[in-house]
Amino acid sequence: MARTRDRHAAVHSLLAAGHSQRAAAAILGLSRNTVNRFAAAATADELLVKATSRASRLDRYKPCLRQRWNEGITTATTLHAELQARGWHGSVQAVERYVRPFRAMTAAPPPGPVPAPEEHKPQTQAASSFVLMPRLVRAALKTGFGGQHISPEQARQSFERRSGGFAVGFLRMTP
């Protein structure tokens, strides 16, 4: 956060001195997009709000972290190990970043709300396979492979061989 504030101040001082955004990017060693973003923000707090208020994969574990912190477990590595047992796949640094403000508090942090369960979001490859593969199989069944009419089972086997077995589960769902 201190780096963001420093960079914001540096960008605005260079722009106030008459430098272009391109020149400020070159002087500071930042990308032009970064300089543009800093220049568009009136204060560094505008940039920090976006970074600190967005959703993260840690959200569903935050009530547990607060509870364990209130119970006296204040080591990020210990908290991380407990989260891993609950299914967390993130880093120790993510847990450390979350609990860092707690260290400055004189009282324990409030428990916080329990988030709603996450919806299952299929991976891009699986989602595109779900959409495309049944359509390809249906088209193959209508026209046949190479002009030959084949059974649904033959189409599934052929497609399974061609796709390396990836589409097996999806093809069985095809009407």
Image (cartoon, rainbow, N blue to C red):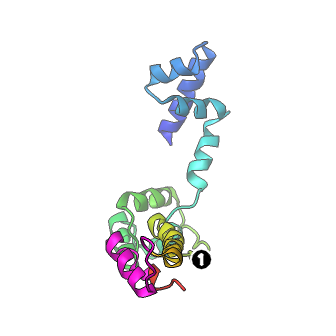
Q: Return the residue at label 1.
A: 114
Q: Is residue 162 magenta?
A: yes
Left or right, residue 85 beside residue 52: left
Q: Which residues are magenta?
A: 145-169
Front residue of 132 and 34:
132
Badge 1 crowding class, 10 Å Cα cut-off, few under 14, some 14 to 19, many 20 or more, is few
Q: Could you tell me if residue 82 is visible in this image?
A: no
In the picture, which quadrant includes the C terminus? bottom right
* x and y percentages locating residue 9 in the rendered image: 56, 28
Q: Amino acid at mark 1?
A: Val
Residue most toward the front?
147
* x and y percentages locating residue 147 in the rendered image: 45, 73
* x and y percentages locating residue 164 in the rendered image: 31, 71
Helix, strand or loop at disc 1? loop
At 59% from the left and 30% from the top, the residue drawn is 36
Front residue of 160 and 37:
160
Front residue of 45 and 165:
165
* x and y percentages locating residue 121 in the rendered image: 53, 71
Residue most toward the top?
18
Front residue of 75 and 53:
53
Q: Could you tell me if residue 149 is visible in this image?
A: yes
Q: Is residue 70 magenta?
A: no
- 169 up-or-down from 16: above or below: below
Left or right, residue 97 beside residue 44: left
At 52% from the left and 37% from the top, the residue drawn is 4
Numbered circles on residues, count: 1
- 26 up-or-down from 142: above or below: above
Q: Quadrant of residue 157?
A: bottom left
